[in-house]
Image (cartoon, rainbow, N blue to C red):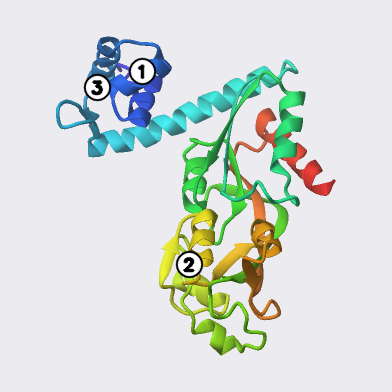
């Protein structure tokens, strides 16, 4: 039987071209000319026997089979990189790269102290190249599942099969309005009165999730905490924010928490990794340092 398994170099060229959406944009990362990249891509397509992408004046795009092949290529490269890190770790020295996904607005969270954990990890393992990616909860889980990320940190209302979720801590959220909002100076308000005002929601939450926190349909949506904050500060909407992220604007008199006894919840943060990767030295070390930092 003739092998149709491409070598790792061809797969790395392919995934780089997809990541940069074209040959020219991938030149710098690959340190190759466009003609050399084109040759490698042609070799790969000849080997697998299908057209993987369209390129030309119309721009770069994956074919349907190319999109499927890309997901498998990412998965395989992630597993190979994980094995390489494991093999190096047997010698006692950790090398390679570690790709971690996080949600936005974590820099102000002293309970997590992600910056301190990363600093400790970098000092203890200086030969490791760290890649930090900010994504939405859905994107970050999908990236871990497909091995585009080695692990992730976040709160996830919907969890995916094939992933492990290790508990870290709980993040406090309150419902806020800005100083331009009519509720800002209202000292006596009912739950019903609050719920009647326009709400900015999170694009990755379902209406059922919003309802679970006592609010009706949303009139605006965002996919980041910064976007949520901007709309709340506009005075046109109310919405949930992490307490640590909102605190600066509360101290400045720009934000106010609405009926904390009624509207508030805690988001359980977890360390997420793909099943079968929990014993990889880099992933294990980073998780251990993170947990030590939270405990401190």
Using the numbered discs, state the Cα–Cα distance from disc 2 to disc 1 in whole angstroms. Answer: 43 Å
Q: Residues within 10 Å of mark 1 (few under 14, many from 20)?
A: some
- Specify whether 39 is left or right of 203: left
- In primary-sequence order, the first of circles 2 and 1 is 1
Tags 2 and 3 touching, CB below 8 Å: no
- In primary-sequence order, the first of circles 3 and 1 is 1
Using the numbered discs, state the Cα–Cα distance from disc 3 to disc 1 in whole angstroms. Answer: 10 Å
Residue nearer the viewer, 154 or 222: 222
View extreme (left): residue: 57
Tags 3 and 1 touching, CB below 8 Å: no
Q: Is residue 43 above or below residue 247?
A: above
Would you say residue 7 is visible in this rendering? Answer: no
Would you say residue 21 is visible in this rendering? Answer: yes
**Viewer-side label of 2, 1:** 2
For residue 40, which quarter of the picture? top left
Q: Tell me the element at label 3.
A: helix
Residue 183's disc number = none
Q: Tell me the element at label 2.
A: strand
- Specify whether 217 is left or right of 174: left
Q: Is residue 105 above or below residue 265?
A: above
Q: Which residue is mark 2?
A: 201
Q: Which residue is mark 1?
A: 10
Q: Position of residue 141 (x, y in %)?
A: 51, 48
For residue 122, which quarter of the picture? top right
Residue nearer the viewer, 193 or 69: 193
Residue 45's disc number = 3
Q: Position of residue 259 (x, y in %)?
A: 66, 80
Using the numbered discs, state the Cα–Cα distance from disc 2 to disc 3 in whole angstroms. Answer: 44 Å
**Viewer-side label of 2, 3:** 2
Q: Is residue 26 above or below residue 256?
A: above
For residue 102, which quarter of the picture? top right
Q: How many marks?
A: 3
């Amino acid at each position: 039987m003739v092998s149709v398994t491409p070598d790792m170099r061809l797969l790395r060229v392919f995934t780089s071209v997809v990541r940069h959406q074209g040959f020219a944009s991938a030149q710098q990362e690959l340190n190759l000319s466009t003609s050399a990249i084109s040759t490698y891509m042609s070799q790969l397509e000849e080997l697998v026997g299908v057209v993987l992408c369209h390129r030309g004046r119309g721009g770069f795009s994956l074919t349907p089979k190319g999109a499927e092949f890309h997901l498998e290529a990412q998965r395989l490269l992630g597993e190979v990189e994980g094995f390489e890190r494991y093999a190096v770790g047997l010698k006692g020295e950790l090398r390679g790269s570690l790709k971690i996904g996080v949600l936005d607005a974590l820099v102000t969270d002293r309970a997590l102290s992600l910056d301190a954990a990363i600093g400790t990890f970098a000092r203890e393992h200086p030969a490791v190249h760290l890649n930090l990616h900010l994504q939405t909860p859905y994107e970050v889980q999908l990236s871990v599942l497909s091995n585009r990320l080695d692990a992730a940190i976040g709160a996830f209302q919907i969890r995916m099969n094939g992933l492990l979720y290790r508990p870290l801590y709980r993040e406090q959220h309150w419902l806020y309005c800005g100083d331009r909002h009519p509720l800002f100076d209202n000292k006596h308000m009912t739950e019903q009165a609050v719920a009647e005002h326009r709400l900015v929601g999170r694009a990755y939450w379902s209406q059922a999730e919003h309802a679970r926190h006592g609010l009706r349909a949303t009139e605006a949506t965002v996919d980041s905490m910064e976007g949520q904050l901007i709309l709340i500060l506009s005075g046109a909407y109310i919405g949930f924010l992490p307490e640590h992220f909102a605190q600066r604007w509360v101290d400045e008199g720009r934000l106010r928490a609405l009926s904390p006894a009624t509207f508030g919840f805690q988001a359980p943060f977890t360390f997420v990794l793909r099943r079968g990767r929990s014993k990889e030295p880099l992933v294990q070390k980073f998780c251990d340092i993170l947990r030590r930092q939270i405990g401190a």
